[in-house]
Image (cartoon, helix red, strand yellow):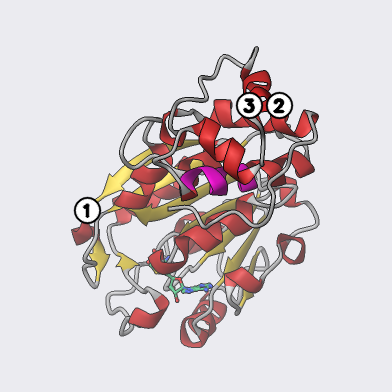
Amino acid sequence: MTSRRELRRLPYPAELPRAKRSLGQNFLIDANIQRRIVDSLEPGPDDEVMEIGPGVGALTRHLAGRVRRLVLVELDNDLAARLRAEYAGEPSVELINRDVLDVELEEVTSDPAALKVIGNIPYNITTPILFSLLERRPRPREIVLMVQREVADRILEPEGSKTYGALAVGVRSVADAKRVLNVSREAFRPIPDVMSSVIRITPHQPPRLEPDEEMALRNLTRAAFGQRRKQFQRILRDAYRLSLEQTEEVQSGLGIDLRDRPETLSPESFIRLTRALTERGYAIAGTPPPAE
Ligand code: SAM
């Protein structure tokens, strides 16, 4: 059996397997960045961690032996077989050879609310991964993900900025989010076309909204950013079929100017507006258009 100390020192393979583009494979070869990403999750000896898309173990080797349980979810059969062999002697490391989007957190752990999630993930499924982790209850305790830099900007930029929209509201209405570091293209093999950033997402504990209010917030966000050039007042009148008097009554006491456009409203304002609407029993009429 490989000792914990040896596991942590497993060398990064000198020869990488041929990357499969269809699986978004860009392997992170910079050991210093690998370590910084793992450290940003603050893994401890009592933690259960799920790693999405471990590849050839760039992050895995800094995590194995450091946490109570490490569950690797890898879709690629060849890489999964390789990881299985490499960590065969380490009972704390488990492998699920499946599409992460088909894996329920309840299959990974009996306590999803305590789970920490990490991954240098395929960029083409960043949004579905994010929402599979955040549009559920309970949400994981911590999430550290490598994403395309432009996606990190869309999540983190303040309201009023050009990139602020449905993604920022979706993430920041249920979690705190921050950038851990930017990663240059040269840190990967093969070198990707886009720049990357690592973000840390900490779901609010306890959540700020009830489950039905979260659903209402998602509908409101979709309606708002489906028509982002319209004033909020207009959106409420069109999507919720509210009269001008009703929108004014909703607005009173909220401290939000509904003549503003959606992109000027903070996630906090979206939360307060959602509460004001659901308290009065106002809901979207029909299916809102997809967000821009
Ligand atoms: N973590 C490794 C690293 O940092 O070098 C690999 C990162 S690579 C960008 C993405 C990884 O996710 C690949 O290993 C790929 O096979 C895996 N992957 C792709 N689609 C997946 C899916 N739907 N579910 C689980 N893993 C997936």
Work out whether residue 75 can be spotted.
yes
Q: Main secondary structure of the magenta part?
A: helix
- Mark 2–mark 3 Cα distance, whole angstroms, equals 10 Å
* Amino acid identity at mark 3: Thr
Work out whether residue 208 can be spotted.
no
Q: Which residue is mark 3?
A: 247
* Amino acid identity at mark 2: Ala
Q: Of label 2 and label 3, which has the lower sequence position?
A: 3
The quadrant where ligand 1 appears is bottom left
The x, y position of residue 171, in whole percent, is 54, 43
Q: Nearer the viewer, residue 23 or 17?
A: 23
The x, y position of residue 72, in whole percent, is 58, 68
SS for tag 3?
Answer: helix
The relative height of residue 14 versus residue 40 in the rendered view (above or below) is below
Q: Of label 1 and label 3, which has the lower sequence position?
A: 1
Residue at 65% across / 73% down in the picture?
102
Residue at 24% across / 73% down in the picture?
190
Residue at 47% across / 25% down in the picture?
259
Q: Which residue is mark 1?
A: 184
What span is colored magenta in the figure? 218-225
Q: Which residue is mark 2?
A: 276
The image quadrant of residue 279 is top right
Tell me: is circle 2 under 8 Å from ligand 1: no
SS for tag 2?
Answer: helix
The x, y position of residue 194, in whole percent, is 24, 60
- Mark 1–mark 3 Cα distance, whole angstroms, equals 47 Å
The relative height of residue 154 versus residue 192 in the rendered view (above or below) is above
* Amino acid identity at mark 1: Ser
The x, y position of residue 89, in whole percent, is 61, 73
In the picture provided, is 95 more to the left or to the right than 20?
Answer: right
